[in-house]
């Protein structure tokens, strides 16, 4: 009996979050540039303050914009994809993890890179004690991630991983999420 190839299920970002990410990073840099310009004109007694805040705004805005830039490209449209089933896997770009190899999965900020301080990533701990990070650039809402895990990944994870996932929520939280997810189906 031939098994037909399953189509990947894509988990996409939200345009609303992409617009806010652009406004928050590039906007911060532009405001910093404007404050720096006002500071070098020396027309105010606050020029020294403008200079400091303006330089901070330019640096912070530029660094965070460069970190989040892939969110504004084709890469930012689909955060990750998955193929459900017994041999299912989650993949994003060159990274791929089988559902049965997942030990722990969560969406959180982390200390593994400077980008993790500002933006949330999907952190997957594998059974081989490896860590797979999938960047979300803060443009993937947490409920969309929870829905993907609950409906497509959780049924195929090991008991240990399932217990870890369920243990992250109180019974009331999980019940509310599950009611919301099954409303959308």
Image: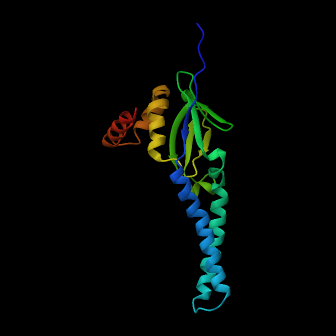
Relative to 164, is 82 on the left or the right? right
The quadrant where residue 57 appears: bottom right
The quadrant where residue 77 appears: top right
Is 133 or 80 nearer to us in this picture? 80
* Quarter of the figure that contains the C terminus: top left
Residue 105, given in percent of the width and then of the height, sits at 51, 39
In this orientation, does residue 109 appear? no
Residue 146, given in percent of the width and then of the height, sits at 45, 40
Relative to 159, is 66 on the left or the right? right
Q: Residue at x 38, y 42 (%)?
A: 169
Is 82 or 130 nearer to us in this picture? 82
In this orientation, does residue 124 appear? yes
Q: Residue at x 48, y 30 (%)?
A: 152
Instruction: Give above or below for 5 relative to 172.
Output: above
Is 120 or 44 nearer to us in this picture? 44
Instruction: Give above or below for 30 relative to 151.
Output: below
Seen as rendered, the residue at the extreme top is: 1
Instruction: Give above or below for 1 relative to 50.
Output: above
Relative to 175, is 41 on the left or the right? right
Seen as rendered, the residue at the extreme left is: 172
Is 116 or 76 nearer to us in this picture? 76
Residue 125, given in percent of the width and then of the height, sits at 56, 38
Residue 4, given in percent of the width and then of the height, sits at 59, 16
* Quarter of the figure that contains the N terminus: top right
Q: Residue at x 55, y 56 (%)?
A: 19
Q: Residue at x 35, y 35 (%)?
A: 183
Picture mark count: 0
Q: Which colour scheme is used?
A: rainbow
């Amino acid at each position: 009996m031939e098994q037909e190839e399953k189509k990947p299920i894509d988990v996409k970002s939200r345009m609303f979050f992409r617009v806010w990410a652009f406004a928050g990073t590039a906007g911060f840099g532009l405001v910093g540039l404007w404050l720096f310009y006002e500071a070098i004109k020396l027309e105010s007694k606050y020029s020294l303050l403008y200079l400091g805040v303006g330089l901070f705004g330019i640096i912070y805005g530029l660094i965070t914009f460069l970190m989040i830039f892939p969110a504004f490209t084709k890469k930012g449209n689909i955060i990750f994809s998955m193929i459900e089933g017994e041999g299912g896997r989650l993949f994003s770009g060159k990274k791929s993890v089988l559902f049965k190899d997942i030990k722990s999965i969560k969406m959180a900020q982390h200390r593994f890179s400077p980008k993790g301080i500002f933006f949330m990533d999907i952190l997957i701990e594998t059974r081989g004690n490896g860590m797979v990070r999938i960047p979300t650039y803060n443009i993937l809402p947490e409920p969309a991630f929870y829905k993907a895990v609950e409906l497509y990944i959780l049924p195929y994870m090991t008991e240990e991983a399932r217990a870890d996932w369920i243990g992250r929520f109180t019974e009331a939280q999980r019940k509310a999420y599950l009611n919301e997810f099954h409303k959308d189906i």
